[in-house]
Image (tube, grey):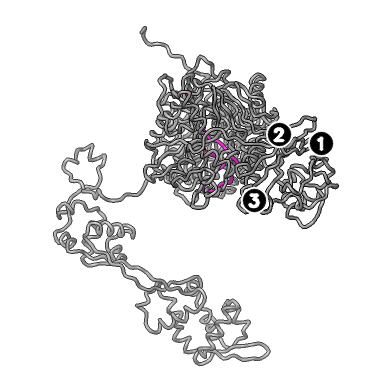
Amino acid sequence: MEIEKLIRTLHPLERKVLPLLDKFHTIDVLQEKSGLKDVEVMRALQWLQNKSLIRVKEDLHEQALLEENGKLYASKGLPEKRFLEILAQGEQPISEILKKAQLSKDELNSSLGILKGKAAIDIKKGNCLSVSLAENGKKLLDKGFPEQKLLDKSFPVELKALSDEEKFALENLKKRKDIIKLHIAKTKSAYLTSHGRKLVERGIKVDVEDKITPEMLRSGTWKNKEFRRFDIEINVPKIYGGKRHFVKDAIDYIRKLMVSFGFKEMKGPLLQTSFWNFDSLFTAQDHPVRDLQDTFYIKEPELGKLPDDALVSRVRQAHEKGVAGSTGWQYQWSEKEARKNVLRTHTTVLSARTLAEIKKSDLPAKFFAIGRCFRNETLDWAHLFEFNQFEGIVVGEDVNFAHHIGFLKEFFKRLGFEKARFRPAYFPYTEMSLEIDVFHPVYKKWIELGGSGIFRPEVVVPLLGKDIPVLAWGPGFDRIIMDYYKINDMRELYKNDLKKIREAKSWIR
Amino acid sequence: MPTVTLNKAVFEKLVGKKLPIDKLKDRISMLGTDLGRIDEKEIEVEIFPNRPDMLSEQGFARAFSSFIGAKTGLRKYDIKKSGYKLLVEKSLPKEWPYALACVVKGIKFDDEKIREVIQIQEKLGTTLLRKRKKGGLGLYPLEKIEFPVRFVGMEPDEINFRPLEYPSVITGRQILSKHPTGREYAHICQDWRKFPVFVDSKETIMSMPPIINSHTVGKIDETTRDVFLEITGNDMYVLQHAFNIMATSLADMGGQIYSIDCIQQDGSKLSVPNLAPREMKIDISYANKLLGTEFTEKEIKKYLERMGYGYKNKKVYVPCYRVDVLHQIDLVEDIAIAYGYENFNGKLPDFFTVGEEAPFEVFKNKISNILVGLGLLECFTYHLSNKKIQCEKANCSIDLIEVRDTKTEDNCLRAWLIPCLLKVLMENKHNEYPQNIFDIGTIFKRGNSETGIVENDRLAVLLCNEKSDYTKIRQVLDYLFAQLDLKYKVEEADHGAFIGGRVGRIMSDNAKVGYIGEISPEVLSNFALELPVAALELNLTELFETMNKNVRIFHPVSDW
C-alpha cells in the first residue's frame, strides 16, 4: 500500500506506538513511554506487524520465580537467618529458639543442618540441647545470608543478570522445597522495518477521525473531516445469535417439504396402547418387536382403554382368522396384550389412527407426521432410545406401487439425494415392503434409511372398512441430519452441547 | 433378524449355477434378504422373519435358483411310507400337546452336513418357534429306535436319562438346573406338572422336548445315514410349517422322506409330513392395479414360478414350506420381486390434495422463532429422565410415571422441562456465557385419557448469566405474550425449585398456564451451577386452547 494511504489506516494505538519504536523495543518500555496498557501495546504491535511496518522478535530466556515458601521467606526471612538472629542474644536451648524464631519442626531441622554446614553454630549436648553462635555465624550475621539477599530481589529474576555468588545461592535454594522455580520466558521486542522507518521519517501525524459522532452529524462538521481507513481484511471476534436447534431446523424443512407435496399433518400422543401401536398394524402378539427388551412399556398405568368394540373385533378377526380373504395369523388374540401402554415405536401408529378416522368422502388423501419414537436401547454412538421418524401415507382407490416409488424418489431428490434404490424387505403391516437406500453423492455409497410399503388388507380393511391401497413410508431421518451436519456419533444429536448448537451451520435447502 | 452363514460351495452346487460375485451380491439383495458379508468360502445373509424357509443352505438356494431362473416352479418331494407309528398320549402336559414325526433316509452325514442341520434347527427354534416357546425340533439316528414311538407326559423326577454331552444320567428336574441347555430353556417348562418325553417301544427315553435329546439315542454323528425327525409344541399351524421346512431341507440334502402315522390325542391320524402345496386364487387385474403394471397371465405365471410357486389355470400352488403367504397380496409382492423392484420407474398420481401443517405445530414454531429473536438458543432434550433429575435435584416431589426395564438410568417420563434444561446447563459449564436457552417438548402426567396418561407440550426458558434475575425472565414472558397478542397475570405462588417471594404462577384467561421465577440457590448448587438462573415454564397445549377459545371475529370494512 502506498505510504499516504497507509498512514490513514493507522489506529490511534498504532499512532502512539509506532514513533517510539525508533528508540525503544521492549514491551515494558513501550508501555511506560506510551502510557498505554499492556494489551493495548500488544494489540498495536500485532496490527503494525500485520501491515509489515515492524518486525517482532521473540527471545527465550530463563527466569527464576518465587514459589509459596519463597514468597513467605522473602517477607519473614529464611528460617536459618531467624535462627541465627535469636542466637545473637547468646546461647539458648533449642526449645527456646524454636519458640522465639517461630520455626516449624521441619524448618528447625533444616536450619540446624544448614548452619552446621556453614560452621556458624556450636551445639552443646547436656540436659537439654543448646546452641551458641560460632565465629563464622557472627560474620554471617554481619554480612547477611547470600540466599536471603537473592530472595530480597524483585522477582521474576533474569538468570543472565545474576552474579556468580547469586547463582550459587540460587542453586542452594533450588534444592529446598517450594522456594524457587525456574521457567523459560518469552520476551517480545519490536523493530521498525525499512517500510516502517519510512513512515516514521515521513511523520505520521494526520488529522483523521476514528468515529462518527452524533455531534458531527448534527453540526455538519463531518464535512471537513477525514476518516481513518480501516484494515477491512482483519479477523474480528466471533459473535453468536439466538438459534433453533439444528435438528428442529431439519424437521421444519421436512415438514415444509411434505406440505408442498400436498400432505396434511397428523398429530398424536407419544404414549399409545399396544392396540394402536401393534395390533391395528397386524403385528402378531408374539412378534419379537413386542418384547420388553425392544419396547418401552409403562409400569403404572400398565393398561389403557381399547377403542369401540366393533373396531376391536375387526382387528381381532384379522389376527385370528383373517379378513378379506386372508388366513390371519391363526392364534388366539388377547385383549389384555392389546391394552398395554407403550411409548410409540413408530409414527406409523398415527397413520393407523388416521385410517380409522377418515371418511370415504375425504379420499383420495395424503397425510404425514414427523415425531419422536422410542425403542429400548442403551445409548452409544450408533444407538439412541429416542429417534425421529417421518411418516407419509397416500390413500386412494387408484394409487399403486409405481406411485409409491415415484413419491419416494421425489422426496429424496429434495433432500439432496438424486438416486434412490428400493430393495424388498419385510414388515408385518406392509406388502410390498421396501427398504429405502439413497446414494450419497459425495461418499459414493448407498445409505440405508428405512422402511416403506403398501399397507396389507389385514391392516386397511378393519380400520377403513374397505381394501383401498395405502402407500406408506416411515424412514428415520436422523442419519440424514447426521450426514448434513457431519456428525459421527448419534448421541451428539441430543447432547445439547451449546457450542455445537451455536456453531452448527444452518439447514439450507 | 436372524443371520445365517452359508457354505458358498454347497450353496452354488444346490443353485446349479455360479454367478460372478457382483451379480451374486445384487441378486441376493433384490430377492429380499440383507447381504451381510460374502467371501470365497462363506455367504452371510440376514433373513427377514417372514421367510424362515430360507434359513438353510437348501432353503436359500432353492429360493435363489428359482429367482435367477435356474430351477423355477414348484418343487416336488416324493414321500414313501415307513409303516411306523407315533402315538401322542393324553398324559402330556396341556401346555405341550402336539407332536409330528417322519423318517428321512440316505443322508451321508459329515461335519459339514451336521453343521447345516444344527443351524436350521437352531434358527427355526429362535425365529418361527419363538425361542422354543412354540415348539422344538429333534433328530435321532433311526437305528437306535424301536417303533412304535410314544410321546408321553412323565413326572419330572421320574424321568431318568443321560442328556446330550452330559457325563451321567440325571432326572428331568435336574436337567433344568444342571445342563446348560436345560438352564437356558428352563423358564418354558419349569412350572409344568409333567414334562413331555419321547419313549420308544423298549421304554428308552429318547428326549425331553423342548429341552434336550438323550446322549445315547438322540445324537447324530458321521455314521448316521437315516434319521427320525420330530417336532413338538403348542401351535399346530407353526409346527407344521417348521416341520415342512426341516423335512424339505433334509430332502434337498439328498434324503428320502418316509411318512409316519402320527396318532394325536383326539385319536385323529395324520400322515406326516404333508408336503402338498396350498391352492390359492390370484386375481390378475388386482395384481396389475396394485402394481401399476399390465402383466399378462403368461408373465404372471413366469414371475410366480421364479418365486417357487406352481401356476395352472388361474390357480397358484403355494409351497408347503412358505409360512408367509396369508393373502393374495403376498403373491402380488412376490410377482413384484420377481419382476424386480429396480424395474419400476415410478410416477406421481394425478389427483390434487391440499397440504397443511398442524396448527399447533405452527403455533410452537412461531414461539421458537420469537424466542430466537431474543437471542435465545434452542435445545432438544429427551423425554425419558429420572427421579434424581426431575425431583431430587430440582427439590420438587412429583409422582413420576415409570417405564419398565430400561437399559439406561433414565427410567421415568419427564413431568416438567426445567430440570432437563438445568441438566443441559450443568453439562455446558465449560462453554461460553451467557447461556440463555429454551426447549419446547412433551411432558407426561397421570390423567383421564385412553392410556391414563395425559401429554402436554411445554415451553421452558432458562436465562443463565451473571445478570439473570426475575426482571429479565419477566421481560421474556412479557414480550412473548405481547407477540401472541395474549393477556396474562402473575400471581404469587410457592414452588420448591424457586426462591420464595421470587416465584409466581402465570395465569392467562383464568387458566393456570405456568410458573416463572428465580431458581433457588439450593437447586442451582444441586446442579453444580455457579451463576444465577431465572426461568419460566409454560403449558403451550393449554395456552393454545385458550387462544382458540377467543377467536376474534372480523367485520368487513366495506361492502365488497
Circle 2 crowding by C-alpha within 10 Å: few under 14, some 14–19, many from 20: some
Q: Earlier in the sequence, mark 3 or mark 1?
A: 1
**Tag 2 subunit:** B
The residue furthest bottom is: A135
A509 and A360: which is toward the camera:
A360
Asked whether the residues under marks 1 and 2 belong to the same chain, the reply is yes
The residue furthest top is: B559
Q: Amino acid at mark 2?
A: Asp
Which numbered dot is residue B299? Answer: none
A242 and A290: which is toward the camera:
A290
Q: Which residues are magenta?
A: A366-389
Q: Earlier in the sequence, mark 1 or mark 2?
A: 1
The answer to which quarter of the image holds residue A249 is top left
Q: Is residue B425 magenta?
A: no
Determine the CA span between mark 3 and mark 1. 32 Å
Kind of element beneath mark 1: loop
Q: Relative to residue A69, is residue B78 depicted above or below?
A: above
Tag in front: 3 or 1: 3
Determine the CA span between mark 2 and mark 3. 30 Å
Q: Which residue is mark 1?
A: B89
**Tag 1 subunit:** B
Instruction: Please report the residue visible at 47 percent of the width from the left and 87 percent of the height from the top.
Output: A140
Check the picture and name the quadrant holding the C terminus of chain A.
top left
Residue B523 placement, left or right of A442: right
Determine the CA span between mark 1 and mark 2. 17 Å
Instruction: Please report the residue visible at 39 percent of the width from the left and 44 percent of the height from the top.
Output: A240
Residue B286 percent across, percent down from the top left: 51, 21
Residue A26 percent across, percent down from the top left: 29, 67
Q: Which residue is mark 3?
A: B109
B551 and A104: which is toward the camera:
B551
B390 and B229: which is toward the camera:
B229
Q: Which residue is mark 2?
A: B235
